[in-house]
Amino acid sequence: MSEYEKLEEILLTQEMVRIESSNPGAYEKVMSDFIYDWFRSHTSAEIIREPVHEGRDNIVAILRGQSGAHNLTYICHMDTVPVGEGWDQPPLEGKILGGRLYGRGSCDMKSGLAAGMLAFRDIARRGAPLKYDFLFIATVNEEDTMTGADQVVKDGYVNERSFVLDSEPTDSRIQVAHKGKTWFSLHTHGKTCHASTPQKGSDAIAAMAEIITRINHKLKRWPVHPEMGPCAATFGTIQGGLNTNIVPAECIAYVDMRLVPPVTNEQSIALVKEAIAEGLAEVPGTTCDLKITAQRPAVEKDDSSFLLKELRAAVVQVTGREFPVDFFPGYTDTAVIASLTGNRNCMSCGPGSLDLAHKPNEFVPCEEIVRARAIMTTLAENILL
């Protein structure tokens, strides 16, 4: 038996990896039931179900403090991306091999979820008066449009005075800034005809190609952030055409654009609209429908952040060394909270590597789960006790 297989944080991670909570797919219902029951069984905290979508609830656990000036909030999402193909290890067993715990969601982010749940329970068991409220929030839909985090803000659990930490996989880093994003749906329309007489039709795919080329060229002119790098666009899926010898009348593309300060969502939308106008002009007879399917602003680092100072101190207490401080390349629930409230005490630090998330054979080193629990417990002790 592995040295890790009797540890609470490992066992809890395994239990949750075995619960499929894919988005889209199974979603979070069974996970939320499990977490709700776990908190009721293991703590005396106030436990609340907060509906977000039908059958999909955020779970909120609260230990009340003596002052409402601030709160410390640990926030972790319950959903994972779909299992997918290409696995060499069983994706829903939480198998431990060579000190690694394998499975979908093992690093993104059920190991961080387990570490945070146990840190919360460790503080609850102290029974000591707390300076501030201590919240643990398990959210839905982070892997899609992050409506779970939106709801947390709407429900008033966090605000500009909260200290908010998620335990996303960060490669032993403290990540305190986030690229912004705008997602687009582009649908070009043309006129079909036989490919031998293309002048009688209008090529919707050619129009899309012109638009895509212009988006990329325009992005290269935007400023490069000294830490986050350049803005970029990924054309995640593209569909169109019926056959090789038919001029295509339809083409659909989905665009994920990532933004760095000082670029705004509004500027990204203006860029795409400009690229559409220029691209369509190159292919007469075509049109394009544009939909903005998601937008989140970039979040800048604040070197004076109280939570950053306390988190760095907790890391040193537990590990005896400093963790690097940089930015999270994706977008997390804490970034949603920061962007909606203006809060600069929102950050990420957790077990595993983002490079392994969303891939076959996702895993997390067991030692990092143990370390994450210790850091999150120490941080809570330092702020609350």
Image (cartoon, rainbow, N blue to C red):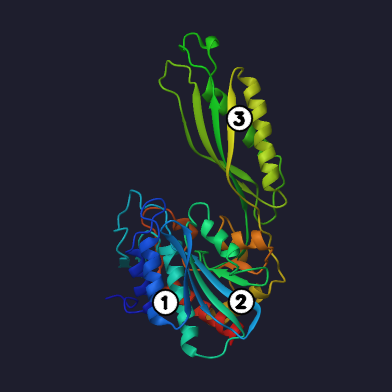
Circle 3 sits in a helix, a strand or a loop, which is it?
A: helix
Sequence-first disc among 3 and 1: 1
Could you tell me the amino acid type at mark 1?
A: Phe
- Residue 235 visible (yes or no): yes
In the rendering, at what x and y percent does residue 313 appear? 61, 79
Residue identified by numbered label 3? 211
At x 33% / y 48%, what residue is drawn? 85
Q: Amino acid at mark 2?
A: Asn
Tell me if 137 is positioned left or right of 67 in this view.
left
Q: Secondary structure at mark 2?
A: strand
For label 3, count other residues whose C-alpha is less than 10 Å away and answer few (under 14), some (14-19) or many (20+).
many
Kindly report the distance in space between the C-alpha atoms of the residues bearing marks 1 and 2. Answer: 19 Å
Q: Earlier in the sequence, mark 1 or mark 2?
A: 1
Mark 2 lies on residue: 71
Assign a secondary structure to mark 1. Answer: helix
Above or below 380: residue 212: above
Is residue 220 at least partly visible in the picture?
Answer: no
Q: Quadrant of the N terminus?
A: bottom left
Give how far apart the Cα atoms at labels 3 and 1 are: 51 Å
Q: Quadrant of residue 78?
A: bottom left
Judge whether 213 appears above or below 83 on screen: above
- Circle 1 is placed at which residue position? 39
